[in-house]
Image (cartoon, rainbow, N blue to C red):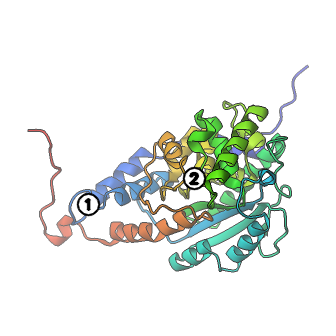
Amino acid sequence: MTALKTEPSFFEETVGKIRPADPAAVQAARDRWDSIAKPLKSLGTLEDMIAQIAGCARSADVRLDRKTLVTFCSDNGIVAEGVTQTGQEVTAIVADNLAKGRASAAILCGYSGAKLIPVDIGMVRDVPSVRDEKIARGTEDFLHEDAMTRQEAIRSIETGMRIATEEADRGVQLLAAGEMGIGNTSSSSAVSCVLLEKQAEELVGRGAGLSGEGLKHKTHVIAEAIRRRRPDRDDPLDVLAKVGGFDIGGMAGLYLGAASRGIPVVLDGVISGTAALLAARIAPAARDYMIPSHASSEPAAPLIFGELGMNAPMNFGMHAGEGCGAALLFPLLDMACRIYRGMPSFEETSIEAYQPFDNEE
């Protein structure tokens, strides 16, 4: 009997479209930088970022007129274990403020002209002003049971993929990922501990401001939850399902969906970085499309970004969430792109071109 052929799922189809960025476009952008009338490499990391964006778009004609930050809002059942300073009602309040332009990330996006899409991917409460993609009313308490089912984990990723696809169809040139959810530093710490094979004591931080005793308790809860759940580090979906959050899945999906359409994505802080690590484990080539923004104050951040091979260009000691760090990078990239596109060349200004400096005698 011939086996029936089944169509690939949206998840599988999207992952299958991801390919590495175009090195020829990266080099063409570097050549453009070297041709304009300024000292060679004088804009440092900003030049690298514009070249990376060219590689993602497969064209040295870099434009950043259309930018979107997607902030995934979700609640986490692990808050029942007393690992946070505030209650879940705060998630809904901040999500509503994001939608109404009153939260930090919304104000920053307004300054840079970026579109903001707050998404309810799993809040306990309903917020009519926020896009409804609710998978469940929060995850389960993963100290006692898996945070979500495997199918819910896939749905969370597919939600991010679908939003990235929609924005690509609307002509977006740069995406960014953010999150909002009380308790999500606990979920992200658990996921990163598993993926990085680290102990909770090495990665767990204070989140929104736990005391010393609170931090000790949070660390114990996460370590014990990982011991009980036994997530398979070689199966990213299993890790997400057992100790993750819907917002982490949504951000990972946004990265994967963006990569499948050749769109670069700016990362935010440690939770965004955890989602990036998860996405890179699912599709390693997706890493080419990720741009770091800032070094979070959470202890896991340098290990996560180091594992991804990234150096965050900004270090303000931030832990604001929402996508604030990503939104802060938008205007810097805009200014760099204006220089890249608008500055005359050495030839046009009749200035002798700078020559590469040779360190060798």
Mark 2: secondary structure: helix
Looking at the picture, does residue 323 appear above or below residue 98?
A: above
Residue 142 falls left or right of residue 200: right
Q: Can residue 19 be seen in this view?
A: no
> Can you tell which quarter of the image residue 11 is in?
top right
Residue drawn at (56%, 40%), measured in percent from left and top?
Answer: 202
- The amino acid type, in three-letter code, at marker 1 is Ser
Q: Which residue is situated farthest in the front direction here? A: 213
Residue drawn at (13%, 67%), measured in percent from left and top?
Answer: 351
Residue 27 falls left or right of residue 57: left
Quarter of the image with the N terminus is top right
Tell me the residue that label 2 is attached to: 270
Q: Which residue is situated farthest in the left direction here? A: 361
Q: How far is mark 1 from mark 2, CA to CA?
A: 29 Å
Tell me the residue that label 1 is attached to: 42
Residue drawn at (42%, 68%), measured in percent from left and top?
Answer: 332
Q: Is residue 227 visible?
A: yes
Q: How many numbered marks does the figure carry?
A: 2
Looking at the picture, does residue 269 appear above or below residue 106?
A: above
Residue drawn at (65%, 54%), measured in percent from left and top?
Answer: 254
> Can you tell which quarter of the image residue 6 is in?
top right
| Residue 280 location (% of width, % of height) | 59, 41
- The amino acid type, in three-letter code, at marker 2 is Val
Residue 195 falls left or right of residue 136: left
| Residue 35 location (% of width, % of height) | 24, 60
Crowding around mark 1 (Cα neighbors within 10 Å: few <14, some 14 to 19, many 20+) is few
Residue 165 falls left or right of residue 328: right
Quarter of the image with the C terminus is top left
